Amino acid sequence: MATTDLLIIRNEHGDIVGAQLEGATVNGILSYIAPADPQHTLHRVSDVPEEICTLADPVEFHRAITAHVESEHAKVTRTSAEELQAAMSRVFADQADK
């Protein structure tokens, strides 16, 4: 089964209010979502089944990703925009050294 990694944002109630494929690019530029509200938190969800990530209907996607995140099989870790930025900086530094 093919899988991918997502970044999700949860609100103060734990509800998912945003999601993005990790490592997504916009016009060739690496980008990632970040919480706008201080009470919202950023999480990495590893090994999300591809069939969830390819759902086009937003309601179906929200239902499926919520069920996955709440399942015993989910690999969810809290992260931060600063942590993602630091990781990207290391990747770019490694590429510049080559």
Image (spheres, helix red, strand yellow):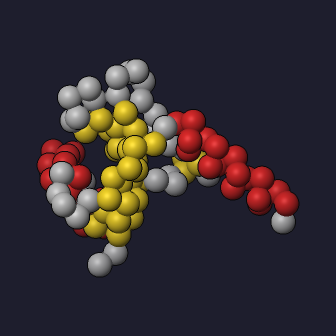
Q: How many marks?
A: 0
- Where is residue 31 shown, x and y percent of the image? 55, 44
Placement of 72 over or under 36, stated as above or below: below
Where residue 36 sits: x, y (%)? 42, 24
Q: Where's the N terminus, which quadrant?
A: bottom left
Q: Residue at x 38, y 21 (%)?
A: 37
The vertical placement of 42 against 36, above or below, is below
- Decide if residue 83 is in sight here: yes
Tell me if 12 is positioned left or right of 79 in this view: left
26 lies left or right of 7: right
- Horizontal side of residue 38 vs 48, given as left or right: right
Q: Residue furthest bottom?
A: 1
Q: Nearer the viewer, residue 58 or 11?
A: 11
Which one is in front, 57 or 40?
A: 40
- The answer to which image quadrant residue 98 occupies is bottom right
Q: Residue at x 61, y 41 (%)?
A: 85
Q: Please give the name of the residue rendered at 40% of the width and 38% of the height, measured from the top-left corner.
A: 42
The residue most toward the right is 97
Image position of 43 with respect to 49: above or below? above
Seen from the viewer's position, the closer of residues 83 and 3 is 83
Q: Position of residue 20 (x, y in %)?
A: 39, 47
The picture places residue 97, in percent across and down from the top left corner, at 85, 60
Please indicate, yes or no, whether residue 54 appears anywhere in the rendered image. Answer: no
The structure residue drawn at horizontal position 50% and vertical position 43%, both measured from the top left corner, is 32
